[in-house]
Image: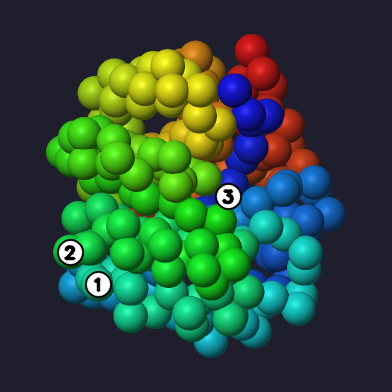
Amino acid sequence: MNPCIVSPSLLSSDFARLAEELQALEQAGVPWVHWDVMDGMFVPNITLGPPVIKAARPKCSLFFDVHLMIEDPGRYIESFAAAGADLICVHAEACLHLERVVSQIAEAGCQTAVALNPATPLEQIDYLLPQLDMVLIMSVNPGFGGQSFIPFSLDKIRGLRHRLDSRRLGTRIQVDGGVTTANAAEIVTAGADTLVSGSAFFKHPSYQEGLAAFMARMQG
Ligand code: DX5
Ligand code: ZN
């Protein structure tokens, strides 16, 4: 399994002070930040696009983990790569030709990832696993922060861990939605190595404390 990573979701940060937030996260020792891009079509909420990521890129050296919750994301891969994404994650449900979009991400020089909504079975990505740097198991229906973790996600994480290990693949397993310090340990025990946290992470008085609290649970 890969080393455990926490990727705080900027959706719960203060967008009015984005540059300062990024610098504070970097100083706290956070490795990744998770950008939630929503288009008001694939999900019932609208957030941000390539210009915001581009403006943020020179402000820090954090790894930019970009979660696209948008319809037909193949239209925008090059724009997000040019804006400074390090990894681009697209939803299987949003792509008619998923293999083509994953290849597009790799060709744009970014790490590749596919997200699955809670009701989408793992079988959808069986053939693609060797091409993926990460799979994102959504543990809430995407669109909003602060929702509760859907319990059957744990079975799905275990199923994906089994598939990856039996094929000797080093693909990361990311989990996003309702992740807290109370359930982080069981999510990692189930096989995840990359946890996204929005509301639970940002409620800590300092980001050092938030990171330490998650890492303590993740490393058992
Ligand atoms: C939800 C987003 C998440 C969200 C997580 O659609 O993809 O990244 O910010 O927020 P919490 O951790 O509060 O569930
Ligand atoms: Zn997300």
* Spatial CA span between label 2 and label 3: 29 Å
Q: Amino acid at mark 1?
A: Asp
Residue 8 is tagged as 3
Instruction: Say whether mark 2 is within 8 Å of ligand 1.
Output: no
Label 1 near label 2: C-beta < 8 Å?
A: yes
Q: Secondary structure at mark 3?
A: strand
Identified at 53% across, 86% down, the residue is: 51
On screen, residue 92 versus residue 129, left or right, reads: left
Q: Amino acid at mark 2?
A: Leu
Which quadrant of the figure has residue 36?
A: bottom left
Label 1 near label 3: C-beta < 8 Å?
A: no
Q: Can you identify the residue that label 2 sits on?
A: 96
Task: Name the N-terminal-most of marks 2 and 1.
Answer: 1
- Seen from the viewer's position, the closer of residues 147 and 36 is 36
Residue 72 is tagged as 1
Q: Position of residue 70 (x, y in %)?
A: 29, 69
Q: Amino acid at mark 3?
A: Pro
* Spatial CA span between label 3 and label 1: 25 Å
Task: Name the N-terminal-most of marks 3 and 1.
Answer: 3
Task: Name the N-terminal-most of marks 2 and 3.
Answer: 3
Q: Which quadrant would the C terminus be assigned to in this image?
A: top right
